[in-house]
Amino acid sequence: MERTWRQTAQFLSVWLLILSARGEEAAAASGQLESSGAGVVNNSVTVVPLGEAAKLACPVPAEMYGTRVSWIRNKDIMLLALADQVIAKDPRIFVTHSGHPDSKESPRHSQVWFLHIKDVTPDDEGDYQCQTSTHPHVSFLTFLKIQKAYSIVQGPKERVVAAGSDLQLVCIFKNFTAPPAYVFWYQDEKMVNYDSSRGIFVSSGGRDHSILKVQTASEEHQGNYTCAPANIAPSSVLVHVIPETTESSGGDKDQKREEKTPVRQLGVKSASSAGSRDLPRLLQLFLFGVLFCLMEASSSTSSLYSSPPRGLRGLRSYATRQ
């Protein structure tokens, strides 16, 4: 019977705390507080990265020895904890406290109560209220802000790399409070942090970025690369590797260039280029020479065998010529 009464009293106290929290929320919304001396103190704003642990503090004045503290989540008026007992059915939540310098044996004589939430999610963001069991009670508000840290791979979202060249990807961490404990790189679904046998190397560039390098990229290195830091949103980039041209065609072209290059360097004109222009010119000169000789020979012969002119004057000139 005594146990039943005790459970009933605990149940009623919980409901009274919830009702009082609702009343204070409505009063705060209208800009009014109760005139009985109850107060709401804006304690602080606690910023926690996504996936890490939150620790909300409730400082209890030293004069409030023996008081119990309850934790309420304001957005759904959910009672999370009463003193050392966790009411919420959430395994991530637990309560601790730091002892007051004047405290003796009782854990209720504490200076600061803490509400812990492990592995916080975006749904955990909002106002949390720590309320004393005194009359008039005092409430301490703290806002839990979930910082959504993210990463970004520098450059375009799609890369094109020539086969045989090197590839470097730089992953930058943004909006974080503490550097990630680790950074994993993935090629499609495969983790490549330790894939040095394929020419892939991952290094830390400091507390705010990570670097992936690929030496002598080939077709096996193309795919979707993802940078996944701990407690930071990942980012990806798509890499295409263009294969090289065949060596035979390239070798033949280079060989032809090498065969022609010495001729140009020595200044010698090949028969295919210069001969077709020089041959007609020489032939013309030769023909002109032959024609000139024939004309000279013909002129001499005609002069030698021509008939003597008539008349005395012509005869004299002919004799003189002979």
Image (spheres, helix red, strand yellow):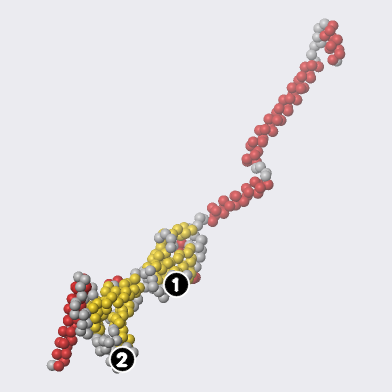
Give x and y (percent) for residue 172: 42, 67
Mark 1 residue crowding within 10 angstroms, few (<14) / some (14–19) / many (20+): few
Mark nearer the viewer, 1 or 2: 2
CA distance separating discs 1 and 2: 42 Å
Look at the picture and state if 208 lies above or below 62: above
Mark 2 residue crowding within 10 angstroms, few (<14) / some (14–19) / many (20+): some
Give x and y (percent) for residue 101: 33, 89
Q: Earlier in the sequence, mark 1 or mark 2?
A: 2
Identify which residue is drawn at 22% across, 73% down: 28
Report which residue position mark 2 lands on. Answer: 103
Give x and y (percent) for residue 56: 31, 79
Quarter of the figure with residue 234: bottom left
Judge left or right: residue 187 versus residue 13. right
Mark 1 residue type: Arg
Quarter of the figure with residue 153: bottom left
Give x and y (percent) for residue 176: 38, 71
Judge left or right: residue 16 versus residue 316. left
Identify which residue is drawn at 24% across, 87% down: 67
Report which residue position mark 1 lands on. Answer: 207
Identify which residue is drawn at 45% across, 65% down: 170
Q: Is residue 51 visible?
A: no
Judge left or right: residue 138 versus residue 309. left
